[in-house]
Amino acid sequence: MHALLYILLLVCVLGVVHTYVLFPYLLLRAAERRCKEPSRPVAESRTWPNVHVLMAVHNEAVVLPDKLDSLAGLDYPGPLTFHFGSDCSNDGSDELLHGFAEQHPATVHRNRERLGKPGTINFLVGDMETNGILVFTDASVMLRPDTVTELVGPMLDDPGIGLTDATMIHTGVPDEGIGSLEDHYIQREVNLKRAESCLWGAMIGPFGGCWAMRSEAFKPVPDTYLVDDFYLCMAAYEAGWRGVSAPRALAYEGVGLYLNDEFRRKRRIGAGNWQNLVRFRRLWWPPGRDGLSYALFSHKVLRWLTPLLLLVGGVSLAGLMILAGNYWTVLAFLLLMGTICALSPAVRYFAAMNVALLLGTVDYLKGIKTNVWQPSHRNQDNG
């Protein structure tokens, strides 16, 4: 029994340390040595393909005016068309979208019933007749005039690249609190995905708020799947495409300031992670087979398993203490962990997000019956 508990504890510790410490360290060190930002010919010397900007909307009237202004300001040098899908909005979002469509090449579709973002995107893509580049974006994400151009550029440079990801920048970041912690997490993810792009041509999942893919790489997202961007990315890799981060394709989004919103979002992502983990298991198992499997296992699979690793590791450690007769040590350890969580915002944030992922696992095991969503709080004052 002692040996089994020691092995379980060791495996759990190694798994968490690898995904949060060892893998990022090794990845970023390798990228520093081997990666340089690619140059690109000037726009005038290129033939730019048709681009279709797609956006699913549900009650986003607070941020839509700014979002539509940013879309109107795009300076993409090729043909550009907008496709909006209203998922039964009832706050005036539809009127704003139709107003935009009166002045720009755009279509507006309203779902008869809630389909969720994946179902809405599936419909918009299926309703198209022209091939080209698909740019997916969220209402809360603001684009620079050259964002779409920078997303398309790498696919023109390399016909093997099927998708590109924007570089997300948070606005309205406070000096402390959950907003600061969330911004630190996202910036860390940006750096990891940029390094993965350089080393293996396979950044592990785009930021769903702004990214692009070739229309021929698109595969409809299955019903009830929650994390559509990750599914589309992995399906493209499965078909042989590569994906990279576009460092000059900048997009801006207000940082999340409400723990309840982030908890709900992480729980939803946790459930969707398991859907993709099972569906694309051949891409990551066995890990280390190639760069994609190693990065996917290290960056995502172990990250998704961290709540279970922490739970099993904690139970194993407590079991070893109890078998050794250290009952008071177990109590002191639990009190210490509780005190650290209460006093350290970073530890509390880490713990809360892993609890959300754990509950997402429970949701997956119970069965996911719908993928409709509710947008987080939108506050223009904080970006």
Image: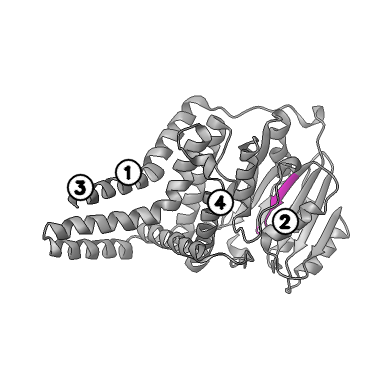
Residue drawn at the location 59% of the way across and 55% of the way down: 227
Please give the residue where the numbered disc 1 appears in the rendered image: 14
Q: Is residue 135 visible?
A: yes
Q: Identify which amino acid the numbered label 4 is placed on.
A: Asn
Q: How far apart are the two marked residues, 4 and 1, measured between alpha carbons?
A: 24 Å
Which amino acid, by three-letter code, is at mark 2?
Answer: Ile
Residue indicated by mark 2: 121
Q: Nearer the viewer, residue 257 or 29?
A: 29
In front: label 4 or label 1? 4
Distance Cα–Cα, label 2 vs label 4? 18 Å
Closer to the eye: label 1 or 3: 3
**Image quadrant of residue 109?**
bottom right
Residue beneath label 4, please?
276
Q: Of the numbered discs in the image, which one, if any, rests on residue 3?
A: 3
Vertical comparison of 232 with 294: above or below: below
SS type, badge 2: helix
Residue 76: where, in percent of width, then height? 78, 42
Q: Earlier in the sequence, mark 2 or mark 3?
A: 3
| Camera-side mark, 4 or 3 | 3
For marks 1 and 2, give the CA distance.
Answer: 39 Å
Q: Secondary structure at mark 1?
A: helix
Q: Amino acid at mark 1?
A: Leu
Task: Tell me what residue is drawn at x 54 percent, y 40 percent.
Answer: 283
Examine the rendering and report whether any part of residue 139 can be seen. no
**Which quadrant of the figure contains the C terminus?**
bottom right
- Write down the region rendered in magenta: 134-140
